[in-house]
Amino acid sequence: MTTTAIPPCSLVIPAYNEERRISLFFDSINHFDGELIVVCDGTDRTAGIVEEIASRRTDLAIRCLRFDHRLGKGGGVIAGLKVARAPLVGYVDADGSTRMEEMLRLFSSLSRADGAIGSRWVDGSTLKVKQGFLRRIESRGFNLLIRLLFRLSFHDTQCGAKVFKKPAIDAVLPSMVSHGFEFDVELLWQLKEAGFHIEEIPIEWQNKGDSRVQKRDMLRMLAGLLRVRFGRGTA
């Protein structure tokens, strides 16, 4: 009987209605010695495109998870992390704003920490294409609110480039209640409360536009975060 080798790392890519960008995401990957778990919970052709790419790109280990209902950004990440097989796990946005080389650099940081998160707002970061002025103001205001509510010291909780040791994720995932865009904040808070060490790493990042976070999503994020912080109910 043959056994499937455990990959060195697992990377989750939540891909809600990403048919226009998912091919570009994979085209940008020259090499990745791990498994790529794409979570497809939308209504377009993303899953079919991913499966076609998987059959063609035999140099990459691609797994496609199909869901017939919306999971939310956090729900998609959770679904991928639950099936990840590697000792090191992470997730990255499907828009290609963070290059795979940057993700590999984050994974290498786990030799000295339980988690590493990419940051656009610490010294050493490179923003090749910046967000618009209003979006940056909103981001800085949101970060200040997070610092006040959760006493997190991170400058950038929302950058979609994060990696962790699997035991750290396994320790907090069962108690997670967030499934929307507020998922990142609750995850970092839960890890901090559990005593895990998370490093914030400067990253090279470029704004790809077409943000999935709209004004109504920001209001839902705020309501969800208040429930997490004070109610611990379903977010």
Image: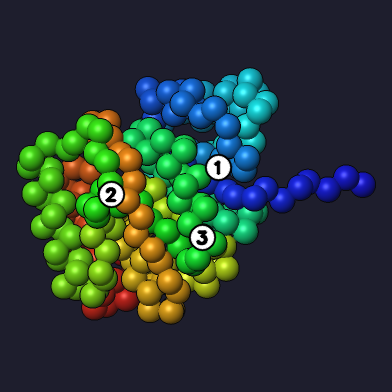
**Residue 42 picture quarter:** top left
Cα separation between marks 1 and 2: 29 Å
Colour convention: rainbow
Cα separation between marks 1 and 3: 20 Å
Camera-side mark, 1 or 3: 3
Instruction: Name the residue type under label 1.
Output: Ile
Mark toward the start of the polypeptide (1 vs 2): 1
The residue identified by callout 2 is: 124
Instruction: Name the residue type under label 2.
Output: Gly
Compare residues 129 and 183 and report the one nearer the observer: 129
The residue identified by callout 3 is: 110
152 above or below 201? Answer: below
Element on which disc 2 rests: loop
Residue 189 x/y as whole percent: 34, 71
Residue 157 x/y as whole percent: 28, 58
Q: Tell me, for residue 37, which label it has, or none.
A: 1
**Residue 53 picture quarter:** top right
Cα separation between marks 3 and 2: 19 Å
> Can residue 211 be seen here?
no
> Can residue 188 be seen here?
yes
Instruction: Name the residue type under label 3.
Output: Leu
